[in-house]
Image: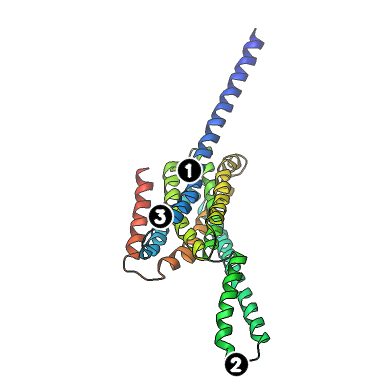
């Protein structure tokens, strides 16, 4: 009888642990799915909603402001809290360098190919009087080559968002696994920031000649990848040490800072509108409010 009681007691404990695990995994998936849905929503807004061109810089600036708040008030803070300043700095440095080198590689592909095309066109014609016509043809060929390559600002945003969103999606899983603070705040800030960043990226993809179907398909890939990363982060939080988790969170912070500075801010200030700074400031303020009240 005692053996039966002991057996049932163990089974109840196992069932309880399994139930809690299932709840946590479902919560993680729900939160990361919410963040991931922002990419599709942002792309749909771009394709179906018209807005004044003067707001393009404001959208990028607003997104930058929210992401700055996310770095300052959750990622850096949690990275140091889970590990130490040293582990945060290691991850942060790795994130900055990784994004910057990847971004540099992507942006170099198009100019290299364009220069090759320019050289071939120049060599194939020996008449100086046709220079103006050649330049026009070169522009058309380079434009076609750009579409074939698929590179450009829009795709850089996709790569940037994928690189910085995957570590942050892993971080959401870590928050749930370790019962850290700021889950709702992190999800809300990432959702808003991703929408505005995606609106800008999808718009540029459209300007670069990509079809609606192609734009949606690429952002769908990003969305699926991010949704899967959350539960992975949850299970990674168990075997990994606090130092490794701190490095992972620091990586997300560094990667996001590089993305803001190299892509969002230059795009925001292309036309240097007087209200761009206001948009960035209010984005940052809203980010602070989210982390303060949620």
Front of the two marks 1 and 2:
2
Say which residue label 3 marks: 49
Q: Are marks 1 and 2 in contact (CB under 8 Å)?
A: no
**Which residue is disc 1 drawn over?**
34
Q: Secondary structure at mark 2?
A: helix
Q: Earlier in the sequence, mark 3 or mark 1?
A: 1
Res 80 visible: no
Relative side of 257 to 218, left or right? left
Residue 262 visible, this angle: yes
Q: Is residue 23 left or right of residue 145?
A: left
Q: Position of residue 53 (x, y in %)?
A: 38, 65
Check whether the beta carbons of the residues at disc 3 and disc 1 lie within 8 A of each other. Answer: no
Q: Position of residue 166 (x, y in %)?
A: 56, 50
Mark 2 and mark 3 residues within 8 Å of each other at the beta carbon: no
Q: Nearer the viewer, mark 3 or mark 1?
A: 3
The residue lying toward the viewer, choosing from 38 and 70, is 38
Relative depth, front residue between 199 and 248: 199
Q: Which residue does the numbered mark 2 point to in the structure image? A: 128
Badge 1 or badge 2: first in the primary sequence? 1
Q: Secondary structure at mark 1?
A: helix
The residue furthest top is 1
Q: Circle 2: is it few (<14), some (14-19), or many (20+) Cα within 10 Å? A: few
């Amino acid at each position: 009888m005692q053996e039966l009681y002991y057996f049932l007691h163990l089974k109840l404990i196992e069932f309880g642990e399994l139930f809690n695990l299932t709840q946590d995994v479902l919560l993680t998936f729900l939160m990361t799915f919410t963040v991931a849905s922002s990419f599709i929503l942002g792309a749909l807004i771009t394709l179906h909603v018209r807005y004044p061109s003067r707001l393009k810089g404001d959208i990028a600036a607003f997104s930058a402001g929210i992401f700055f708040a996310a770095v300052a008030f959750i990622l850096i803070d949690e990275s140091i809290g889970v590990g130490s300043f040293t582990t945060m700095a290691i991850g942060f440095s790795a994130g900055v360098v990784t994004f910057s080198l990847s971004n540099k590689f992507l942006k170099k592909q198009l100019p290299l190919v364009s220069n090759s095309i320019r050289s071939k066109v120049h060599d194939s014609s020996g008449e100086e009087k046709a220079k103006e016509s050649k330049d026009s043809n070169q522009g058309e060929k380079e434009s076609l080559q750009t579409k074939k390559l698929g590179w450009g600002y829009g795709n850089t945003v996709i790569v940037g968002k994928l690189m910085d969103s995957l570590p942050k999606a892993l971080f959401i899983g870590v928050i749930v696994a370790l019962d850290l603070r700021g889950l709702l705040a992190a999800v809300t800030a990432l959702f808003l920031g991703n929408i505005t960043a995606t609106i800008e990226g999808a718009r540029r993809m459209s300007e670069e000649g990509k079809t609606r179907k192609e734009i949606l398909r690429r952002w769908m890939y990003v969305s699926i990848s991010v949704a899967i990363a959350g539960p992975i982060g949850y299970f990674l939080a168990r075997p990994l040490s606090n130092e490794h988790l701190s490095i992972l969170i620091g990586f997300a912070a560094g990667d996001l800072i590089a993305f803001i500075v190299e892509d969002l801010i230059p795009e925001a200030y292309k036309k240097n509108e007087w209200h761009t700074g206001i948009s960035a400031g209010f984005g940052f303020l809203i980010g602070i409010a989210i982390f303060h009240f949620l």
